[in-house]
Amino acid sequence: MQEHCPGIRIPDLFAFGFTDGNYFIRVQQTSVYTSLWRKAWQWVYRCLRYPSLSDYIRDSGAPAVNSAYMLLEYIGPETGKMLSLTWPDHLSDTARRKNLFAGMARIVLSLARLPQPYIGSFKFNTLDCTVALSNRPLTCTMAIFEQRGTPRTIPRDRLYQSTDSFASDVLTLHDTHFLHDPHAVRDEDDAKERMTLRTLLRAVSHFFILPERRSGPYLVQPTEFHQSNILVDEEWNITCLIDLEWFCALPVEMMAVPHWLTNCSIDMIIDD
């Protein structure tokens, strides 16, 4: 995002490590010679259309730790506050809402300028330090389901070339969650209602897939765009985004504004 969407302010990632003992540091924190050498190789990779070579190199001098870690830039109050802190107070302020909507639109459009050939998410390759669209579309909902005990229904390395197959697997994921999570329903009536909705979704899902977009291109979108991930100033101009791990390349039909902008739960929205 820092390379292709410089207009979107995000925290700098200085270093990170994995549990397998691989540690990486930002190349700008090394010598000038190393930085220039990496820039030259990045140019070569772009010319040959190889996966994007990142700004991170292996750090052989990092102390060994027994857990994964990320060393991120501290975003202080001088940059902005979480939108969730002031949302109840200024919800009806037309000027602030206009600033917020304009900022969100700029972010969505900036990400949409990077069309992708597959439905999936980006992955860092520890062997060559490249970043490529090579992972399943790992949304926040999918991660929550699996953490609660739902069996994995979409393999880690699966990419989708068709919106139809992706929609079918997402519905299967929700069915699997329904069957394995003991807290998936409140009572018998709620269970019947959810089963009916799932049946209807499978029956009518093809009506919501654009024929001309069935095979892409697909757009990078945030799947966890909530108020606590957006930092704003006093006038609700967006100053920074945090919690970026849930960005995926998804069908254009999934591009939508967050329902919380209405200040209603999703099942309470009845009109346009």
Image: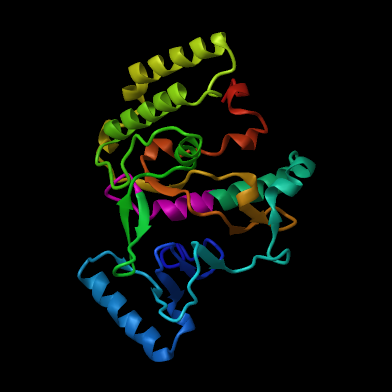
The spot of residue 23 in percent (x, y) is 43, 71
- Horizontal arrangement in the rendering, residue 20 relative to residue 189 (left or right): left
Which colour assignment does the render follow? rainbow
In what quadrant of the picture does the C terminus appear? top right
Q: Is residue 109 magenta?
A: yes
Q: Residue furthest right?
A: 89
Q: What is the x, y in percent for residue 48?
A: 20, 70
User: In the rendering, at what x and y percent does residue 153 appear?
Assistant: 34, 34
Residues drawn in magenta? 105-120
- Asked where in the image residue 54 lies, by quadrant, the reply is bottom left
- Specify whether residue 95 is in view: no
Residue 199: give x, y in percent of width and height. Answer: 39, 15
* Residue lying at 52% horizontally and 65% vertically, measured from the top left: 70
Residue 49 seen in the current view: yes
The residue sitting at 74% across, 40% down in the picture is 91
Q: Is residue 232 left or right of residue 59?
A: right
Total numbered badges shown on the rendered structure: 0
Residue 235 against residue 166 in the figure, above or below: below
Quadrant in which the N terminus appears? bottom left
Residue located 49% across and 62% down the image: 68
